[in-house]
Image (tube, rainbow, N blue to C red):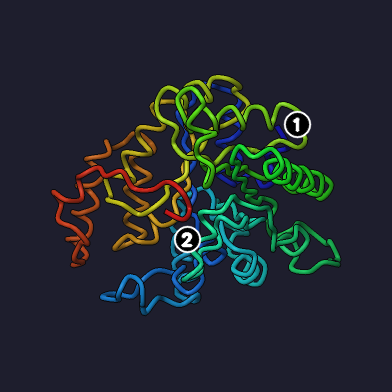
Amino acid sequence: MSTLLTTPHKSLDLKLRRLLDSPGCRDFILADAKDADMAFGLAAPGLRTGADRSRGPFRSIDEYRASIREIVQQGLVDVMLMSASTSEVLAIDESLFTASAVTPAVRMNDTTDIWLASGSGSYTRQSALPFSTAAIDHVQWGRLEPARIGRPAVDLGLFSMTLNGDARLDRDMLEAYGRFRRDAELSGFRHFLEVFYPNAMPAAADAAPLGTARFLADHVVRALAGVPRAGRPVFLKIPYLGPEVTEQLASYDRSLIVGILGGAAGTTHDAFSLVAESKRHGARVALFGRKINAAEHQVEFVRCLRAVADDELSAAEGVRAYHAALARLGLAPHRSLDDDLLITHNATAYGG
């Protein structure tokens, strides 16, 4: 693994160290993914109360950033993932994370399958192509020619890949990842790796044993086999692959910490049970964006999510505790308790 300890009080670094030192460790890393402005545009911050789902009005980027401040101040997530522009405001200008246990992170690339501006839905059906808007120096220092005095504001980024079983396109995606790894290592910049399910040409994945889950897991293992510790991701962000493949991937290489992504919002039980189920089968990280952002009260949602992740509440108990918190706050829930206790099969792709 690359160097982990950057600031002694960061909960991410402490948990990563414990997870690597003790495979049976029950620590669980939670991340809030507030990087949706790199995908959805105006809709990224979420709907205003009573708004139409497709037409809005939507919350502003300032309101989106205000919710980030609240959750960072709460201190129950370990990582806050942002766009470079939001990170500049909060991590560089405001030094929001300097005295916080929360680690700031930035999305370092925006492949074409997450170009989700209204009316551009065809991008999600075309094989993903590599593309990056952010630059490491911009993320660390706010400019391309920094003075490099002191510590950079951010030393962790997300790199995302989508592989589709097309040799030429997948080679391009992997070469882009290789260039990023080289630049990151030279800059002392850590990363975690996101790998989505194929967004096109699904027949290639369907031909694999256990379908897309095995396709994705095999590609992760194969892609990282040629990468030494200095260039490896500190953890993975992938769809939950089901019990069998998740257990196989988590036990294959104990130095590779498996994390799951949240996908579409769904019910509260969807979110809480995904954490409990994936942890049961070896995952030790969850990164939720829309599941947190769509909540009636994000801070209370995170509080209950943390209790589930730390084995203090079952998923169903977490849902009940969350509804009790909404009642105390006088907030109307999006769904009745009974409906929110349902588990649905909501999408796990960014564009779902």
Q: Residue furthest bottom?
A: 57
On the picture, is 180 further left or further right than 287? right
Residue 31 place in picture, x, y as percent = 49, 49
Residue 3: quarter of image: top right
Q: Nearer the viewer, residue 238 or 122?
A: 122
How many residues crowd mark 1 within 10 Å: few (<14), some (14–19), many (20+)?
Answer: few
Q: Given the image, on which type of amino acid does mark 1 rest?
A: Val
* Mark 1–mark 2 CB contact (< 8 Å): no
On the picture, is 136 further left or further right than 11? right
Tell me the residue at 32%/70% (across/down): 53
Label of residue 227 in the image: 1
Residue topped by disc 2: 73
Secondary structure beneath dot 2 equals helix
Residue 222: quarter of image: top right
Residue 286 place in picture, x, y as percent = 46, 42
Tell me the residue at 45%/28% (across/down): 26
On the picture, is 145 further left or further right than 194? right
Q: Given the image, on which type of amino acid does mark 2 rest?
A: Gln
Residue 106: quarter of image: bottom right
Q: Quadrant of the N terminus?
A: top right
Tell me the residue at 20%/44% (across/down): 342
